């Protein structure tokens, strides 16, 4: 059956799940997979289905792990919206509160398992779907190797979606599917949420509490739009924004944020390369792009070619280093 916002809305209403709750948690609607193939058959004969690309990636990852003596198996793969409704109804029938259920299970229409790209992974000797999975050699192996196969941990500890930490749940988001494009006014709400969760997770420690509050205000959807006068781009997997860059002027890079689940995958660099190309072609008179970097981001900016032009100093409650990128025009 085809999913649609209307169909999902009707299902949520039937389950008494308020739409505000989904907005508060910034849960993205997930599209039900259209094409599925068998990815694995469990020891109990259960069949696990994924999209063809995700299934191939899963099998490649499983073989690579096995070659290093690590056993990884599926305990969940594709799940339809209908199945998600059944799961919620079963839990409600057992007397669980909706609040408790939704900390562990996605509302129908919002589970990454609908996409046929998400997997729940277990290993020998670990209880399934328990936080103890984090202590296993399999989890350690995945942390180092899963990204090579396109798999990313969806719900780390303190994730912004209000789910409990799920070390077993990984999603296939291969880097070759990353799309960099200009952001539109319709993207600003999601871009702001991304900036906030990236800031809170990765950068806020460098900022004094008052300065943090100011930053969060200044990165509201409305303010982001104003701060994007010269250029603003997002990095997207599927419809989900995972990186954001904005330039209020052609010589000023004011924001470059990547979702904490997707750092160290080259997304920040890809956003910068696209911005640099844009400035070089549209603003040929610009010789230098400047950015104020927090201590956390200095190594990143250095890695993409920015050089420090000041010692570290405190500016409005935040430690920053001024950095500059010299544009060398290539004809
Ligand atoms: Zn899962």
Image (cartoon, rainbow, N blue to C red):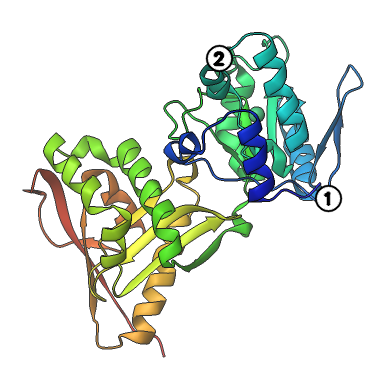
Say if 266 sits above or below 159 in the image: below
Q: Is mark 2 within 8 Å of ligand 1?
A: no
The residue that disc 1 covers is 35
Quarter of the rendering occupied by the C terminus: bottom left
Q: Is residue 175 left or right of residue 214?
A: right
In the image, is 279 to the left or to the right of 97? left
Residue at (24%, 82%) from the top-left corner? 286
Residue 166 seen in this snapshot: no
Please, is residue 326 above or below residue 157 in the view? below
Instruction: Give the image location of residue 50, x and y in percent.
Output: 79, 41
Find numbered disc 1 in the image and state the secondary structure of the residue it sits on.
loop
Rendered residue at 44%/68% (across/down): 184
In the depicted view, which residue is nearer to us: 273 or 330? 273
Q: Quadrant of residue 285?
A: bottom left
Query: Which numbered disc covers residue 97?
Result: 2
Residue at image position (36%, 61%) is: 245
Q: Position of residue 19 (x, y in %)?
A: 51, 38
The crowding category of the residue bearing disc 1, from other C-alpha atoms within 10 Å (few below 14, some 14 to 19, many at least 20), is: few
Q: Is residue 193 left or right of residue 132?
A: left
**Is the residue 77 above or below the residue 296 in the image?**
above
Q: Residue furthest bottom?
A: 331
Name the quarter showing ligand 1. top right
Q: Residue 259: percent from the left, percent from the top?
A: 44, 46
């Amino acid at each position: 059956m085809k999913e649609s916002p209307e169909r999902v809305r009707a299902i949520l209403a039937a389950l008494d799940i308020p739409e505000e709750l989904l907005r508060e948690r910034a849960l993205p609607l997930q599209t039900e997979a259209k094409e599925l193939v068998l990815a694995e058959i469990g020891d109990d004969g259960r069949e696990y289905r994924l999209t063809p690309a995700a299934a191939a990636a899963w099998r490649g990852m499983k073989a690579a792990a096995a070659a290093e003596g690590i056993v990884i198996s599926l305990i969940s793969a594709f799940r339809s919206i209908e199945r998600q409704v059944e799961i919620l109804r079963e839990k409600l029938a057992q007397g669980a509160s909706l609040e408790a259920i939704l900390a562990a299970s996605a509302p129908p229409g919002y589970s990454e398992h609908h996409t046929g790209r998400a997997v729940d992974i277990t290993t020998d000797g670990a209880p399934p779907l328990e936080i103890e999975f984090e202590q296993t050699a399999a989890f350690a192996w995945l942390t180092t190797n899963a990204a090579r196969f396109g798999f990313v941990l969806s719900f780390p500890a303190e994730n912004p979606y209000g789910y409990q930490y799920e070390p077993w749940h990984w999603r296939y988001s291969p880097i070759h599917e990353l799309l960099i494009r200009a952001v539109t006014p319709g993207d600003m709400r999601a871009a702001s949420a991304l900036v906030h969760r990236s800031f809170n997770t990765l950068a806020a420690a460098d900022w004094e509490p008052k300065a943090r509050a100011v930053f969060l205000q200044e990165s509201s959807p409305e303010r982001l739009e104003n701060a994007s006068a010269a250029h603003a781009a997002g990095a997207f997997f599927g419809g989900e924004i995972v990186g954001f860059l904005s330039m209020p002027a052609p010589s000023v890079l004011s924001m470059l944020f990547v979702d904490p689940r997707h750092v160290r995958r080259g997304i920040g660099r890809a956003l910068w390369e696209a911005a640099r190309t844009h400035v070089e072609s549209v603003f040929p008179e610009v010789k230098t792009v400047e950015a104020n970097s927090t201590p956390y981001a200095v190594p990143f900016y250095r890695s993409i070619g920015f050089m420090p032009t000041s010692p570290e100093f405190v500016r409005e409650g935040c430690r920053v280093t001024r950095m500059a990128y010299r544009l060398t025009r290539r004809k």
